[in-house]
Each structure stands twice: as structure tokens, then as C-alpha cells.
Image (cartoon, rainbow, N blue to C red):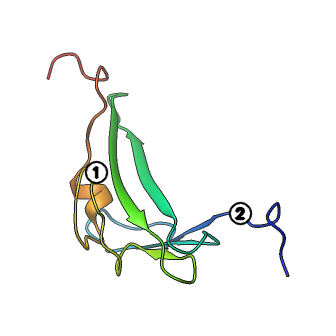
């Protein structure tokens, strides 16, 4: 039995490498049941600009969020969007002053 101090969220992304148009699976485990969680992606482009995307989720009864199964309740995308963290990327405010 794990104690509260031993229970840490575990983020899994499979495959760990891939092409931009290949689907990937993101799973977060070891959350509390029905826990609110925000999944945030931050990307630094070749031009050294920062881009971000995020989705708000609620874990299931087992304390798990699976991006390909669960709906984002808000953020830069909503709904069941397996690739939402890629297609909804937008410039971080102040990162690109010429946009």
C-alpha cells in the first residue's frame, strides 16, 4: 500500500519519438480519483520562439487521464483530441513580438 508521500503522478508518452503527423498516446497515472489536472506542452522553435498548448482534464475513478480517451474540458482545445497538444500550439504571449 502506498502512502500519500509515495503517490506521485506518472506521465507516459508513447512513442517517445515520432513524426509530427504520427499519433501518440499520453497517459497520466497515480492521480487522485476525479482530480482536476492541466496538461501543458511547451515548445521552443528553431527561431527560439516559445509555443504552448494546454488542456484541462478530470481523472477517472482509477486516477488516470488518457488523452486519446478523455475529454479536455477547456484550454487551447476542447473535447477528445489525441493530437490537441500539437495542433492547438500558439505563441506564448511576449515570445514573438512581431505577430
Crowding at dot 2, Cα within 10 Å, few <14 / some 14-19 / many 20+, comes out as few
Give the quadrant of residue 43: top left
Nearer the observer, 85 or 34 = 34
**93 lies above or below 5:** above
Nearer the observer, 32 or 70 = 32
* Residue at the image position 48 percent from the left and 58 percent from the top: 37
Nearer the observer, 73 or 94 = 73
Q: How far apart are labels 2 and 1 at the CA level?
A: 24 Å
**24 lies above or below 39:** below
In the picture provided, is 31 more to the left or to the right than 96? right
* Residue at the image position 41 percent from the left and 43 percent from the top: 42
Task: Name the quarter where the N terminus is drawn.
Answer: bottom right
Q: Name the residue under label 2.
A: 8
In the picture provided, is 69 more to the left or to the right than 63? left
Q: Mark 1 points at which residue?
A: 75
* Residue at the image position 61 percent from the left and 70 percent from the top: 32
Amino acid at each position: 500500500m502506498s502512502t500519500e508521500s509515495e503517490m506521485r503522478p506518472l506521465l507516459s508518452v508513447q512513442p517517445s519519438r515520432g513524426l509530427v503527423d504520427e499519433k501518440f498516446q499520453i497517459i497520466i497515472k497515480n492521480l487522485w480519483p476525479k482530480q482536476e489536472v492541466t496538461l501543458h506542452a511547451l515548445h521552443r522553435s528553431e527561431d527560439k520562439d516559445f509555443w504552448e498548448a494546454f488542456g484541462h482534464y478530470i481523472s477517472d475513478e482509477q486516477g488516470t487521464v488518457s488523452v486519446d480517451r478523455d475529454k479536455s474540458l477547456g484550454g487551447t482545445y476542447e473535447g477528445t483530441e489525441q493530437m490537441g497538444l500539437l495542433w492547438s500550439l500558439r505563441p506564448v504571449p511576449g515570445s514573438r513580438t512581431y505577430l
